[in-house]
Image: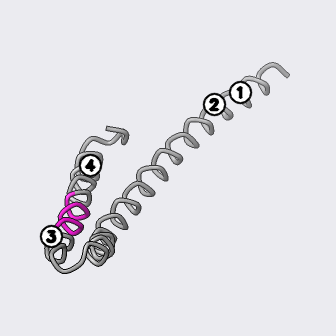
Amino acid sequence: MRLPKKPLGFVVNFLLGVSWAVAVLGALSSFLALYQASLFHAVVWGIIGAIPGIVLVLLLEHFITSQEKLAELRKQTRLLEALSERNEAEL
């Protein structure tokens, strides 16, 4: 779990798993519906069927990385404030 907040991390990871399931099921159902007619069309529609789930995965991964970036920036801000206070105290 990459998010520090446990409830939010649980929800995001659950939705991430659901998104991967949607991507796999979309690709599989589209492929299996059309593979008897033409293998090329089945592969193309399989890719198209996976797109909604993959878009959801990308959105959730973007959310996770932005939350990680925010946490890192907060850490850096605290360290810089501590260094600034330390330098002011030395002067």
Q: Residue at x 62, y 39 (%)?
A: 77
Q: In the rendered structure, which segment of residues is drawn in magenta?
A: 21-28
Q: Distance between the residues labelled 4 and 3?
A: 28 Å
Q: What element carries label 1?
A: helix
The residue that disc 1 covers is 83
Judge depth for marks 4 and 3 and give the one in front: 3
Q: How is the image coloured?
A: one colour
The residue that disc 3 covers is 32
Q: How far apart are marks 1 and 3 (CA)?
A: 61 Å
Q: State the image coordinates of residue 85 (x, y, percent, origin top left).
A: 71, 29
Q: Nearer the viewer, residue 42 or 30?
A: 42
Q: Distance between the residues labelled 4 and 2?
A: 30 Å
Is 26 magenta? The answer is yes
Q: Are marks 4 and 2 in contact (CB under 8 Å)?
A: no
Q: Would residue 65 be found to the left or right of residue 27 on screen? A: right
Mark closer to the chain start, 3 or 2:
3
Give the residue type that dot 1 points to: Leu
Q: State the image coordinates of residue 56 (x, y, percent, origin top left).
A: 33, 65
Give the residue type that dot 4 points to: Asn
As drawn, the label of residue 13 is 4
Q: In which quarter of the image is residue 49?
A: bottom left
Q: State the image coordinates of residue 39 (x, y, percent, origin top left).
A: 26, 72
Q: What element carries label 3?
A: helix
Q: Which residue is drawn at 54% across and 39% down?
A: 72
As drawn, the label of residue 79 is 2
Mark closer to the chain start, 1 or 3:
3
Mark closer to the chain start, 4 or 2:
4
Determine crowd level at label 2: few under 14, some 14-19, many 20+ residues with C-alpha closer than 10 A.
Answer: few
Is 13 magenta? The answer is no
